[in-house]
DNA sequence: ATTTATTTTTAGACAAAACTAAAAATAAAA
DNA sequence: TTTTATTTTTAGTTTTGTCTAAAAATAAAT
């Protein structure tokens, strides 16, 4: 169907599209794909010819309906494999990314249907991100950033923005985990740092931490 | 580490090496890889430079120790994934090959270690073929072909030579399965066909079937 | 032992996906 | 509104793995 490279570009465009109202620009895509702008232009042209993206020179690129559908299926596969790795093969949430990046490109409808069934149709991956269904639909939670909570407020940790191994290990070390309740005991005006309580312990976190944790109130 | 293509060549050489005492010749490898002899020569040179094979012009190719080790790890991965597909995702034994061909190239030591554990360290794949361990060692059964049994003899079905979907479906249809006991009720001198009994039923099979079933007495 | 046939290798080309360097278009600044 | 800076595209290469066609080596046959 589509090449490894094409699939990765579609996924990257989907990702960047979420954070920009206008089209995804070449340099941003080059940065995301760890490649050069000229390579991006070449690939975007190819995707455009296959009607996976809408592209006008110098105007950035948008996913077409069929491109979005394809990209969402790759995301679906990625997240299902992440659940598999954590739930069945005892990977921790900071170890799954690289492997899922490979597994997401395996081509077999039956495989993904059966995997979904085997995992009992999970709705979210180990980082709290929603798993699109076979049609590409998924549930968007009305989550907010921990940094937006005020003193005294509380909520449940439903996701993380930064999924880097370093950040996830920091959370593990401090017993901050998905599903846990977080209470804001205090907020320092000066540096925006917060004193939070979770899992029985209290802990001071910098804004760099607080802006990477999603809370549902 | 190695490219998809390199891995597939190593696997093909391992496969062909079993059935020929001398080196694997270019045309056989081209046939196995569904490519042209000239392409094979190119790739074999590359593998030779990486010390994965021993190659002298016009003399055929042999796996080196490191090439054999690499090839066996790919076979290990292929067969473990086959077990996963059949045992956990309810694939049937005639559906696993294509998907396992893709999964065998996923690169992650932890993945395969954990998968092996998850599957309870299986010794054989769904077709009865042995699964090499992490060192590349595996148990070779002293199996014989069904066609070599005489009238009155019996044994257990421990493997199949032909793993094509067509053959496996034929076996399924006639309740001939791995682990079942097979008894030779009669053998026709004229066409070498056999009357066998398995799973309570008796059935006449042609030599084409009998030479593709492995028996352990 | 030649001739003929087969197998294998070389030489040159191509497609995919990347690159560098330079040109063109757009955006920002004076 | 020019000039300057930035972004994007084009043009021409490179690498990997393939191909075709032709040459060279080996094997088979007369």
Image (spheres, coloured by chain):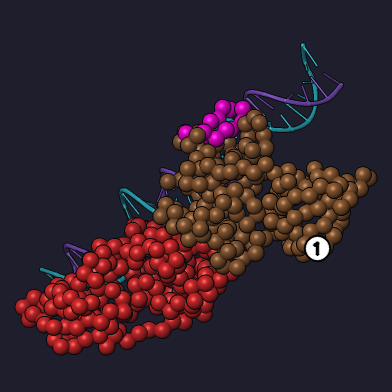
Chain colours: A red, B brown, C cyan, D purple
Position of B88 with respect to C23 (left or right) is right
Position of B161 with respect to A80 (left or right) is right
> For this rendering, which residue is in front, B101 or B57?
B101
Q: Give me the residue at 41% from left, 84% from top.
A: A139
For mark 1, name the chain: B
Q: Determine if the magenta segment contains residue A119.
A: no
Which quarter of the image is occupied by the N terminus of chain A? bottom right
Question: Is B139 situated above or below A48?
Answer: above
> For this rendering, which residue is in front, B201 or B81?
B201
Measured as percent of width and height from the top left, residue D26 is found at: 67, 24
> Residue extending furthest right?
B190
Measured as percent of width and height from the top left, residue B165 is found at: 70, 59
Numbered range of the magenta stretch: B51-64
Measured as percent of width and height from the top left, residue A47 is found at: 47, 66
Residue located beneath label 1 in the image: B200
Which quarter of the image is occupied by the C terminus of chain A? bottom left
Q: Determine if the magenta segment contains residue B57.
A: yes
Report helix, strand or loop for mark 1: loop
> For this rendering, which residue is in front, B192 or A110?
B192
> Residue extending furthest left?
A190
Q: Give me the residue at 40% from left, 63% from top.
A: A90
Q: Is residue A61 visible?
A: no
Q: Give me the residue at 33% from left, 58% from top.
A: A34
Q: Give me the residue at 54% from left, 46% from top.
A: B132
């Amino acid at each position: 169907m589509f090449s490894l490279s094409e699939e990765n570009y579609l996924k990257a465009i989907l990702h960047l599209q979420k954070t920009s109202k206008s089209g995804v620009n070449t340099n941003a895509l080059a940065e995301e794909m760890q490649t050069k702008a000229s390579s991006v232009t070449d690939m975007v042209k190819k995707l455009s010819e296959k009607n996976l993206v809408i592209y006008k020179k110098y105007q950035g690129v948008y996913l077409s309906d069929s491109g979005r559908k394809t990209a969402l299926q790759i995301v679906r596969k990625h997240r299902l494999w992440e659940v598999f790795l954590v739930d069945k093969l005892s990977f921790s949430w900071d170890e799954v990314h690289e492997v899922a990046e490979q597994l997401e490109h395996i081509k077999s409808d039956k495989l993904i249907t059966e995997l979904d069934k085997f995992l009992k149709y999970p709705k979210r991956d180990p980082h709290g991100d929603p798993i699109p269904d076979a049609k590409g639909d998924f549930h968007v939670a009305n989550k907010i950033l921990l940094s937006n909570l005020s003193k005294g407020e509380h909520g449940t940790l439903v996701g993380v923005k930064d999924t880097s191994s370093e950040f996830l290990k920091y959370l593990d070390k401090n017993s901050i985990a998905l599903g846990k309740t977080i209470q804001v005991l205090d907020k320092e005006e000066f540096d925006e740092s917060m004193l939070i309580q979770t899992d029985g312990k209290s802990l001071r976190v910098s804004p760099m931490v607080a802006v990477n944790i999603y809370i549902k109130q």
